[in-house]
Image: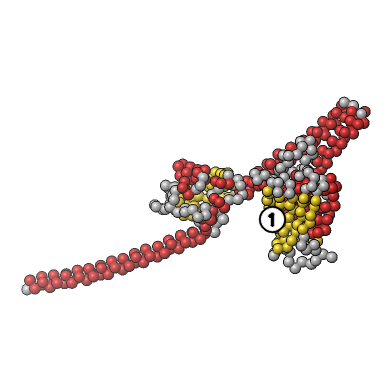
């Protein structure tokens, strides 16, 4: 009887163990399924978070990189990929990815010290991170690096922002150059005028009519020079201060503008025995713009050709024609030309290529071509120059054709 009870108890216990084991396995399976489901959901959420992060960072206008503790690039947004062109960035050390080591200095300092670091890097054109796409000459970049808060193991530890500040840097340089050149260009004739005034007053030169007249003639040339500088500076200021939006845009025949310019330069053309040829397939071609500024543009280009080539027999061509949706205007001459080293700088304020001129000659203001460039740009156009010394120098302007505009009366 006892053995039978023992057997029944053992059997019951075994059944209970089997049931518990089965429940345990079922619970474990449910737990594993739940864990796998959680892992899948977590992976999907993580991937979605990374996708959203990448979309957000790709929308940034600045280049943005994520770098690990070994200075290897782990993420590069669209602006970075565009900036560095065809070069591979991911999983590469920043020293290899950047063309110039100065671009990596702020990041390396941040990795070394753990503190945020920022640097302004000014590079020559050939060292730009844009590579062969760089056409702006000297370029400037702000590199901003800082550690990420609480990075996960194996994840990037530092973010790097590369901001293109070339336009601001060049504008600041233009301002500095303008201040320095303007003060110099005004100070020089004022000093000359003051010197001659002292001679006239202190040395009693007024009592000598011939000498006084010669002094006054020189002083008048320099006062005219000051007047021209101030007038040109005011024109540039108006074009750059927003007043270009107030241009008096109206249709006018460009040929009449050419005639006005040639009348103003008639004496110079005659004295130099220059030959001016007008090349206009359509003499009734109409421009839509501010006639005052277009007269300034044409006058400065033709006068520049005559001043740069003070010899007899210079040939100058003024051309204008409509091609598709653009109007091309050009002024060319067969003079001495512009050295290739000077071509990138000729539209800078106060820049001159008058090395062959006499030092006794009263030079131009050096602002004429700057006015030309800014007036053309104010009309939505572009200007370029090519030069083959001794053969042809050509300034070519391209502006959009105005649509649905009324013809002038």
In percent of width and height, residue 370 lies at 72, 48
The residue at which mark 1 appears reads as 382
The residue under the point 25% across, 67% down is: 24
What's the image's color scheme? secondary structure
User: Which of the image's four quarters has the N terminus?
Assistant: bottom left
Residue at point 45%, 42% (across, down) = 112
Residue 267, percent across and down? 85, 47
In the image, 284 versus 312, the foreground residue is 312
Query: Closest to the observer: 318 or 172?
Result: 318
Q: Residue at x 54, y 47 (%)?
A: 143
Which residue is pictured at 47% across the width and 44% down the height? 108
Q: Quadrant of residue 354?
A: top right
Task: Please state which of residues 373 and 310 is positioned toward the viewer in this rendering.
Answer: 310
362 vs 201: above or below: below
Relative placement, left or right, of 33 versus 335 is: left
Q: How many marks?
A: 1
Q: Residue 172: in sight, yes or no? A: no
Q: Is residue 133 visible?
A: yes
Q: Is residue 351 left or right of residue 277?
A: left
Where disc 1 sits, the SS reads strand
Residue 159: percent from the left, percent from the top?
49, 50
Is 196 situated above or below 176?
above
Quadrant that contains the C terminus = bottom right
- Left or right of 167 on screen, residue 78: left
Q: Residue 335 placed where, x, y %?
A: 74, 47
Q: Residues within 10 Å of mark 1 (few under 14, many from 20)?
A: some
């Amino acid at each position: 009887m006892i053995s039978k009870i023992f057997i029944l108890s053992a059997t019951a216990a075994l059944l209970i163990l089997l049931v518990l084991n089965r429940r345990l396995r079922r619970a474990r399976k449910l737990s594993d399924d739940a864990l796998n489901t959680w892992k899948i959901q977590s992976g999907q959420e993580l991937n979605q978070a990374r996708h959203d992060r990448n979309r957000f960072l790709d929308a940034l206008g600045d280049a943005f990189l994520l770098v690990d503790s070994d200075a290897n690039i782990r993420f590069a947004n669209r602006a970075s990929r565009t900036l560095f062109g065809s070069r591979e960035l991911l999983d590469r050390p920043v020293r290899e990815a950047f063309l110039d080591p100065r671009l990596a200095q702020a990041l390396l300092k941040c990795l070394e010290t753990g503190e945020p670091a920022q640097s302004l890097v000014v590079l020559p054109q050939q060292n730009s991170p844009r590579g062969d796409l760089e056409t702006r000459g000297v370029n400037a970049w702000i590199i901003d690096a800082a550690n990420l808060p609480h990075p996960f193991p194996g994840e990037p530890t530092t973010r790097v922002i590369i901001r293109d500040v070339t336009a601001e840097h060049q504008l600041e340089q233009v301002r500095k150059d303008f201040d320095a050149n303007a003060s110099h260009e005004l100070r020089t004739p004022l000093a000359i005028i003051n010197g001659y005034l002292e001679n006239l007053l202190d040395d009693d030169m007024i009592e000598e009519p011939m000498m006084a007249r010669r002094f006054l003639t020189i002083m008048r040339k320099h006062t005219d020079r000051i007047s021209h500088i101030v007038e040109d500076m005011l024109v540039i200021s108006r074009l750059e201060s927003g007043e270009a939006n107030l241009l008096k845009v109206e249709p006018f025949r460009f040929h009449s503008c050419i005639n006005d310019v040639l009348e103003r330069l008639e004496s110079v053309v005659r004295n130099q025995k220059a030959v001016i040829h007008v090349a206009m397939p359509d003499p009734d071609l109409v421009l839509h713009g501010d006639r005052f500024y277009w007269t300034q543009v044409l006058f400065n280009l033709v006068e520049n050709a005559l001043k740069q080539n003070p010899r007899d027999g210079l040939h100058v061509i003024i051309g204008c024609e409509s091609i598709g949706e653009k109007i091309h205007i050009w002024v060319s001459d067969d003079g001495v030309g512009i050295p290739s080293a000077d071509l990138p700088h000729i539209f800078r304020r106060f820049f001159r290529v008058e090395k062959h001129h006499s030092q006794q000659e009263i030079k131009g203001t050096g602002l004429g071509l700057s006015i030309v460039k800014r007036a053309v740009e104010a009309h939505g156009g572009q200007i370029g120059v090519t030069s083959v010394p001794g053969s042809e120098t050509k300034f070519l302007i391209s502006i959009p054709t105005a649509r649905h505009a009324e013809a002038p009366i």
